[in-house]
Every structure is written in C-alpha cells, then in structure tokens.
Amino acid sequence: MPDHVYEHVTFAVSEIEHRYGPNVHLLADPYLLTLLAQLCSPDTVQPVVNRLVHELYRFMTAKVMATEFPRRRVEMPTRMIASTPRGVYVGEVLEPRTRAVVVDVARAGMLPAMVVYDALNHALDPRGVRQDHVVMSRTTDERTGAVTGVSMSGSKVAGDAAGAVLMVPDPMGATGSSACAAVDIYHAPGMQPPSKVILMNLIVTPQYLRRVTTQFPSATIYAVRLDRGLSSADVLRAVPGERWDEENGLDDHQYIVPGGGGFGELMNNAYV
C-alpha cells in the first residue's frame, strides 16, 4: 500500500493583518523582507541589485504557484522502481496542463518576468506557457513632474490569455496605472479574458492597492512589503487598510516612500 500523506497538501502563505480585502496578500516573510531591505539600500549596486531581484522573485513565484495554481494527484515511479514496486511517489503536484501567460512590463518588469517564466516552464508543460512584452513609460506633467498616466508603444502581445493564469511581476506598485494598463490589454474587445489575474510586486502603496482592486476587483495581488511612509503617525498606528483613504505611500513625484528609488533605472544602470 502506498503512503497517501501527500494526497491533500495544505499550503498557505504567512501574511500581515490588513483591511484591503481578501485578494490582497501582504507577505510576512523575514527572508524576503531582508533581501528587499538590502535591495533598497543606497549602498546596493549592480550586480547585487539584479541578483537580489532574481532571488526575491524566485521565492515569490514558488509561494504563488503553491497557493494559487491547481493541482493533480499522481502515482509517479521514482528511480527505485527498478529494485522495488514500492518505488512510487503518490501525492499532489501542480497541474502541468495549467496555461499561463507572463507579462513583462518593461523596464523594471523584464528580469522578474523572465524569472517567473522560467519557473513556470519547470513546473508546467512549457507548451502552455507564454511570455508577452509590454513597453510603457510614465507620462508626466511638464510643470510639476507628477505622473499623469502611461504611454504604450512597441509591445509584443501574442494574442489573448483565454483560460490562462495571467501573471504580472512588476517590482514597484506605485500608482497602479502601469499594472492596470497591462491587465487591460487582455480585457480589450475581442480578447478572451484569463481565468485568473495575479499581480506580483515587491513593494506596493495604498494608492496602488486602491487603483487595482477598484479597476480589477477579481485580481489577486501578492507583495513582499507595503509602504505607506508618508501617512500621519496616527494613521500608521492603525491596521493597514483600516484608514485606507488617509494612507499615503507616494511623494509629490509619485515615487514610493520609504521605497527604494526607481528600480527600472537601477536594474538597467540607465538613469533616463
């Protein structure tokens, strides 16, 4: 008789308490928080910047897939089957037929998207995994320098994401404009929508969470850290999301505080 202990595996990520809704997952992971603190330090430069981004997204992807992706029961022979009929693993694995589309939001999302894409190809049937590339840039007010929206050009989207898990790994969730513009592509007229939308961020602000959950209420958000550093002391003492409208994580130029600067610039050593 095979061991059936892994036929129903329970897995849940550790999260901080908040009031942003059930689709928002703010991870409580000391290892990831340590790496992110190092990444945001002004003393951290290349090649360490990209190594940390790679490691953060590698671990995040494992957690997201274990939590969000469907599974199946298998009876899979091991190498010991040659010497004993008991050399068979019986239990759950990720459903390899799951279709997934990863969206690279250039520039900061290029490396994270590749990490997620590679991980999906390891765990799933690669024939059902795709990576799209969305090129967008912030548009700003010429007078104040404040971000007013996004501009898209030169994107490579290979069709709709019908029935697939759509994954958008973008490090900085600041205003939500880039994330919503990327997801909106797959909900355009004539496009068959994905079965699930998962946004994977290293840092998010309350403003980002408000924008995304309002425009795409069924989307799921995973983030290593919530930054609301420009909120009042009174608001900071409240449970995150309890006084959502009073929380602030953005300065006058729409950069995250405490944040870590412009990740697109840091990851590419290109300060334009």
Image (cartoon, rainbow, N blue to C red):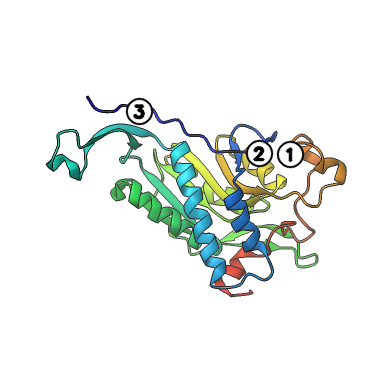
| Secondary structure at numbered mark 3 | loop
* Mark 2 / mark 1, whichever is N-terminal: 2
Dot 1 amino acid type: Pro
Crowd around label 3: few <14 · some 14–19 · many ≥20 (10 Å): few
Of labels 2 and 1, the one closer to you: 2
Extreme residue in the top direction: 1
| Residue type, label 2 | Ile
Residue ID for mark 1: 240
Name the residue located 47 percent from the left edge and 34 percent from the top edge: 11
Task: Give the percent coordinates (x, y) of residue 178.
Answer: 60, 54
Q: The C terminus appears in which quarter of the rendering?
A: bottom right
User: Residue 53, how many percent across, how many down?
Assistant: 54, 60
Q: Secondary structure at mark 2?
A: loop
Give me the residue at 39% from left, 34% from top: 70
**Mark nearer the N terminus (2 vs 3):** 3
Residue underneath mark 3 = 5
Q: CA distance from mark 2 to mark 1?
A: 9 Å
Q: Would you say 169 lies left or right of 173 here? A: left
Label 2 belongs to which residue? Answer: 16
Q: Splitting the image into 4 quarters, where does residue 266 fall? A: bottom right
Q: Are marks 1 and 3 in contact (CB under 8 Å)?
A: no
Q: For the residues marked 1 and 3, what is the alpha-carbon distance in whole angstroms?
A: 38 Å
- Is tag 1's residue or tag 3's residue first in the polypeptide sequence? 3
